[in-house]
Image: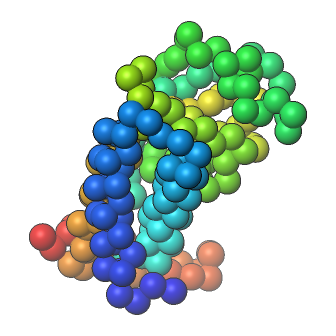
Amino acid sequence: MIFESHYWKDPLLELVLKIQEWEQNKNLREPELSDIERELMVGFYSVRKLAQSNKLSDKILDENLKVLVFPNIKKVNLMNKFWIQKNFDLQSSTEKSLNIKFLYNQIIHSYIFVISESQAGGLNGINFCSDYKKNEALYFLSTEEIKRIFRKVGKDYPAQGHMVYNEEKGDYDISIGKDNG
C-alpha cells in the first residue's frame, strides 16, 4: 500500500526527462532499448499502483489518451509475435481515445511490446497489446502522450476524498477530489 505518493510520483516526472533524451538519441542500441522497455513498464505499473491506492484524482483516472489502433490480419503466437508488420495492418490505423486504465493494463500485461523509432531515429512511441487483445489489435502510444500522462500523474495531489460504504460489494466506493496545486 502506498502511504506517501511522492515516492512514486517524482520518478514519473524524472522519467519524462529520460523520454526526452531517448527521443533525441538517433542511435538507440540494445542497452537503451532495454532501459526504455523496463522504465516504461515500471512507469505504467506505478500509475496503476497509484490508482489502486487511491492516490490519484478521479479526473486523472478518467483521462483518455490518443492512440493509433492497427487491426490484426494474422493469428499471433509466440513464434511470430515480433513481426508486427505481418500480423497487423500498419497501413490502416484508426485514431482512438482510450482510457488510461485500459491502456496501463494492456502495457503491463503486454504480449507484444515493441519500441518505435522515428524515421530519423530516436524514440517516438511504443506498440503493444495484451495476450487478450493480440488477435484483435495492436496499439501505438506516442511519446507525447506518454509524457503528458506521466506529467499529470506526477503532479496530481488530490486535496480531498469521499468514501461511502457499498453494502452490495462489501467495501467502500471512493471518489477522489481535485488536485491541490
Work out whether residue 168 or residue 176 is closer to the camera in this orientation and state it: 176
Q: Quadrant of residue 92?
A: top right
x and y percentages locating residue 105 in the rendered image:
59, 54
Q: Is residue 51 visible?
A: yes
Work out whether residue 49 or residue 58 is closer to the camera in this orientation and state it: 49
x and y percentages locating residue 63 in the rendered image:
35, 49
Q: How is the image coloured?
A: rainbow
Residue at the location (85% across, 39% down)?
78
Residue at the location (34% across, 55% down)?
18
Work out whether residue 133 or residue 167 is closer to the camera in this orientation and state it: 133
Q: Is residue 96 visible?
A: no
Q: Residue furthest top?
A: 91
Residue at the location (40% across, 89% down)?
3
Q: Residue furthest left?
A: 181
Q: Is residue 124 above or below residue 42?
A: above
x and y percentages locating residue 51 in the rendered image:
45, 68
Q: Is residue 26 above or below residue 132?
A: above
Residue at the location (52% across, 17% down)?
93
x and y percentages locating residue 100 in the rendered image:
45, 50
Location of the C terminus (image quadrant): bottom left
